[in-house]
Image (spheres, rainbow, N blue to C red):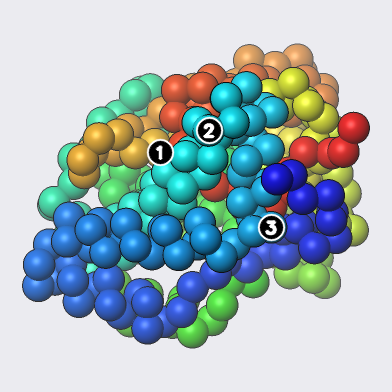
Amino acid sequence: MHNSSTEAQRWEGKSKGTVLGYRIFVFLMKHLGIRAAYTLLVFVAFYYFLCEWSTNGCMYYYFRHRLGYAPLKAVRSVYESYFSFGQTIIDKIAILAGLEDKFTYEFDGIEHLQALLQAQQGGILISAHIGNFEIAEPFFKKIDLQLQICTVVSDRERSAIKDYLQSISQCRPSQQFIYVQEDMSHIFEINEALQQRKVLCFTGDRYMAGARALEGSLLGQKAKFPAGPFLIASRQKVLVLWVYVMKERGLHYHLYARVAQTKDRDTQSVLDAYTQQMELMLKKYPLQWFNYFQFWEEN
């Protein structure tokens, strides 16, 4: 089931979905509760499981060949991963729509984040597309009252969905955003944020073709990673933290913050430490790997 078409399955900076689909889930959550939306998700996830053959191949490869699952368990896990991903999307929408109090949050390593913010010397947070980092908002706004956290993101998501989510949002943003631009103008914004001693937040696991890349090993196989976050982390004399927001059972989330243990000014050392931390998370939360494209390099 592993799709060998590398060109077709590289990440292009966009996610699937329609505004109508989001509206249906919002209606269900507001009138019948979040768990009613989860019930509908059973069928939505099954649709993707039946129809998304190229994505299925990439996910089967992850479960079968990177985690070593038996074939039947790997196939079942492909479906379960769609369901898990759908839950994180529903949770994000619910929080934006003002249902944040329905969730519980657990801080693990918050003292590292608090110390970094209180020092006001700047810092680097690096996360990944595992778990549900997009709902870090409730965590951050409890500790970042001075808006020091600045998140660097791709701005290629479908604008209609983004506009709809903004229209239902009842959250006061506690984060500032820097959008990655094709003309590289975001580099100036990043440098300015660093000079202002902001805390920069990146995801480090989605390399786009044509961009500068680093090679690392994840779950025993080589893959390409975007060079930017790791170059910046290795060259700035600031604290670097790995930060993940992982979904537990029910409506409970667990934020992890870990201090990066790396060699000074060694970019590869930063990347290697990052992939080691990712492996720890993936072995604990295997269904929360949400990179639905051919991530690893061919043998």
Of the image marks 3 and 1, the number of the one nearer the N terminus: 3
Q: Nearer the viewer, residue 247 or 76?
A: 76
Q: Residue at x 13, y 51 (%)?
A: 102
**Rendered residue at 84%/56% (across/down):** 5
The mark found on residue 54 in the picture is 3
Give residue 245's mark.
1
**Quadrant in the rendering for residue 175:** bottom left
Residue 7 appears in the rendering: yes
Q: Amino acid at mark 3?
A: Ser
Residue, far left: 31
- Whichever of callouts 2 and 3 sits on the residue coming sooner in the sequence is 3
- What element does badge 2 sit on? helix
> At 36% from the left edge and 33% from the top edge, which residue is drawn?
255
In the image, residue 182 lies at what x, y percent?
80, 70
Q: Amino acid at mark 1?
A: Val
Numbered disc total: 3
Q: Quadrant of residue 273?
A: top right
Left or right placement of residue 60 versus residue 92 in this view: right
Going 63% across and 30% down the picture, which residue do you hit? 64
Marked residue nearer the N-terminal end (2 or 1): 2
Q: According to the image, label 2 marks what residue?
A: 72
CA gap, disc 2 and disc 1: 29 Å
Residue 252 vertical placement versus 155 (above, below)? above
Q: Is residue 119 visible?
A: no
**Viewer-nearest residue: 93 or 240:** 93
